[in-house]
Image (tube, grey):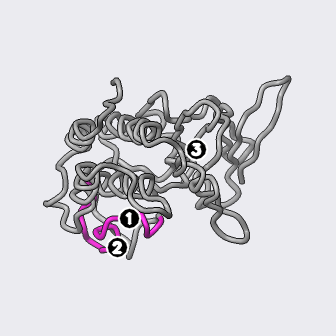
């Protein structure tokens, strides 16, 4: 269960475990945030056990690009995002890639990463990463029939029991993110070189992808007419 609260004029976002699976997910989230911090990653500032685990996060203004509702996914924010100038979209993508550089350095692999993890502040043109609760130390071997996540972002190996999940799997998800954020109803908005980067990053064969997130980031930056500052 998640909700926002206001305490003495300060806003917070709260997650409370209401089941055994939810508690395990929040426990994993704690390990992820203890292991990796980045300015764009929204990390909990307090952890409470009352008696169930509750995590308190700072409030960040913005709209989730894929907001789950009872009626289904609401992607109106993503449609709005697609109308932004290409340079602004490139900068947002660079923020997500840079955060995953730090994630990879800390030995973590992206699991259940998709546009629902992207919170965008349209007023300040700021991208935030949220809900990285399923990220795990890698490499690891899949011991279930499929990993959790959106099929639109998942690499083929995430559906194969016994497959190895490593940094190339993270590269695939980031490649899908690049494709998704730069493709509007009107079609591809990036450069041909950027499209080529995304295609290689999402190759079904892990060996054919970029070996690391760092190589993906550097190659992506070289394709932009407006390279972001690191």
Residue at numbered disc 1: 154
Task: Give residue 58's quadrant in the image.
Answer: top right
Q: Could you tell me how far apart the alpha carbons at marks 3 and 2 are, in whole angstroms?
A: 27 Å
Q: Residue 209 sits in which quadrant?
A: bottom left
Q: Which mark is residue 83?
A: none
In the image, what residue occupies the spot 57% across and 54% down? 78
**Considering the numbered disc 2 on the image, is that residue within a helix, a strand or a loop?**
helix
Q: Percent x, y for residue 52? A: 70, 48
- Tell me the residue that label 2 is attached to: 159
Q: Position of residue 208 (x, y in %)?
A: 14, 60
Kindly report the secondary structure that dominates the magenta region of the rendered protein.
loop
> Whole-Å distance between the Cαs marked 2 and 1?
8 Å
Residue wearing tag 3: 119
Position in image of residue 1 (x %, y %): 72, 54
Locate the C terminus and report the quarter of the image it occupies: top left
Span shown in magenta:
150-166
In the rendered view, does 32 fall on the left or right side of 62?
Answer: left
Q: Name the residue at 65% across, 40% down.
A: 62
Query: Between marks 3 and 1, how big is the CA–CA gap?
Result: 19 Å
CB atoms at circles 2 and 1 under 8 Å apart? yes
């Amino acid at each position: 269960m998640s909700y926002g609260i206001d305490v003495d004029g300060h806003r917070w976002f709260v997650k409370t475990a209401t089941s055994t699976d939810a508690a395990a997910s929040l426990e994993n989230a704690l390990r992820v945030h203890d292991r990796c911090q980045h300015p764009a990653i929204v990390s909990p500032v307090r952890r409470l056990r009352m008696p169930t685990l509750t995590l308190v996060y700072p409030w960040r203004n913005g709209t989730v690009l894929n907001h789950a509702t009872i009626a289904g996914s609401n992607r109106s924010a993503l449609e709005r995002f697609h109308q932004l100038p290409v340079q602004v979209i490139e900068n947002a993508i660079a923020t997500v890639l840079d955060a995953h550089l730090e994630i990879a350095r800390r030995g973590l692999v992206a699991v259940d990463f998709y546009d629902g993890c992207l919170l965008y502040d349209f007023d300040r043109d700021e991208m935030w990463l949220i809900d990285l609760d399923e990220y795990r130390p890698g490499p690891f071997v899949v011991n279930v029939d499929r990993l959790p996540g959106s099929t639109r972002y998942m690499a083929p190996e995430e559906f194969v029991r016994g497959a190895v999940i490593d940094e190339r799997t993270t590269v695939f998800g980031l490649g899908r993110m690049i494709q998704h954020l730069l493709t509007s109803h009107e079609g591809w908005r990036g450069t041909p070189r950027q499209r080529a980067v995304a295609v290689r990053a999402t190759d079904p064969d892990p060996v054919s992808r970029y070996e690391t997130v760092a190589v993906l980031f550097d190659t992506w930056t070289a394709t932009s007419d407006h390279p972001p500052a690191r």
